[in-house]
Image (cartoon, grey):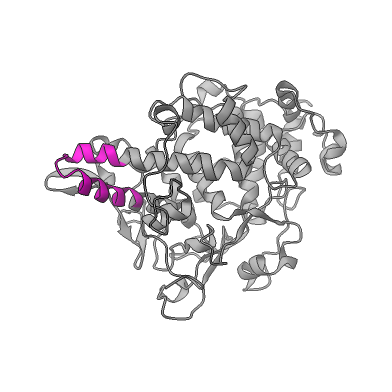
Amino acid sequence: IPSDKLNEALLALGAKGGLMDAKDPLEGDPRRPVLLITDAANSANNPDNPNQPAGTTFFGQFLDHDFTFDLESALGIRTEPEESPNGRTPMLDLDTVYGGGPSRSPQLYVRANRRVGPKLRIESGGLFEDVPRTRNGVAIIGDPRNDENILISGLQAAFIKFHNKVVEEVTKQNPRDDADQIFSKARRIVTWHYHWIIVHEFLPLIIGQNRVNRLLERGPRFFRTPVPFVPVEFQGAAYRMGHSMVRPSYRANFNGDVGGNPAIAAPAFFGMIFDPAGEGQADPVDLRGFTRAPRRFIGWQTFFNFGDGNTRNTKRLDTTISSPLFDLPLATIPGQELAPTSLPQRNLLRHLTWSLPSGQAIAKEIGVAPLTSQDFQEGVRDLGLDRSTPLWFYILREAFVRENGLRLGDVGSTIVGEVFIQVLKSDRNSYLAANPRLRPTLPDRSGALTGNFAMTDLLTYAEVVKRGPGSPE
């Protein structure tokens, strides 16, 4: 397809109201943010994934921000990948949390006894934890993208509190260590438990446990690099699969709309992930970030499975995208003067930006049967995109056709799985490189040392889990 025609086809494919739009009913009923969760009839075109808790989406976004940040490329304008420098270290080292450390990023750290650190700064949103902010509400964190919505901002705050709790434990166990030694030991413990969660919880949900097992036993087949590196096929397409997992609305917490008092039976805070009505509001009706208010905190029982029946799920991995993502708030878009505001259109235009290979080309390269023309919707065939399909769209369609939308298919899982495992293996500071036999040393949420560690354990250890309906006293 000529480049101008391809550009038109990509814009048509990702347009609001088009083939990829779930057409979620967003208007006409003030209860819509609730109904989109509780009434299946409101999500007829946008089914849930029963295998993935809703927090998987935002933990995935948190990971993405940890090792990719495209600072230079313009949408739809061909750019050599080496001309688009990565604004993050290409390692899963939590530099979004730690910045350059106490000496290079002192604004992120507590000042005490004429020293900076070893604890990170944490503040309150009025009732519960919030990231530190300037008087104007701007988050003081290692990566501004981790304030795009209150879910990822909540994760940022949780990791800050997790680090600070580990600092307290390390200090107790090593009373003669100075602040620098305590910081280094605490950061290593935090980072290695984070890596454990990536390998043993997140990746199995995204690509399947059998594929993770093979990667750990045999190593990557196609993506092998002696130094950490993030390829554009991952950054520009495959890992953008998380956008398909986003729900149109969420229950942010159980009783935030009356001040978060667990003793009061009161309305939960439900909101659209993005809602145009929230533009310019001091305390927006939606779940966008970049602001502070008492109700803007997270009840994590909705997002990860604490066994209390409160967990909600992601949407399935497919080519159906929740409708709010077709009308992004400008504050979430770097270089906002560059249209469009439809996230699917922006993702598809990156196919042109980096001249990415088609999904079929990668399928043949890795030796798996590519999707056929009949595996695509009629609208895709009409646009001429069924035989040389943009990689992002192909990966989502493959997940739907081959895995019922429950996890990525062969092309998607090969790219995503191999990049994560190889990035960890090629970083001498990761647990897979430095100590592959590691078992977690921190307690699980029951307080027991089990040799396992999940997001529910991290959130409990960090003391950010609020009591919700059905939670134990």
Q: Quadrant of residue 324?
A: bottom right
Q: Residue at x 49, y 64 (%)?
A: 284
| Residue 22 x/y as whole percent | 72, 55
Q: Residue at x 44, y 35 (%)?
A: 92
- Give the residue furthest to the left: 113
Q: Is residue 423 above or below residue 300?
A: above
Magenta residues? 162-186
Q: Is residue 131 above or below residue 297?
A: above
Magenta highlight on residue 185:
yes
Q: Is residue 281 above or below residue 174?
A: below
Q: Quadrant of residue 432?
A: top left
- Give the residue furthest to the bottom: 264
| Placement of the C terminus among the 4 image quadrants | bottom left
Q: Nearer the viewer, residue 97 or 327?
A: 97
Magenta highlight on residue 24:
no
Q: Nearer the viewer, residue 125 or 52?
A: 52
Q: Is residue 174 visible?
A: yes
| Placement of the N terminus among the 4 image quadrants | top right
Q: Is residue 124 above or below residue 175?
A: below
Q: Is residue 44 left or right of residue 97?
A: right
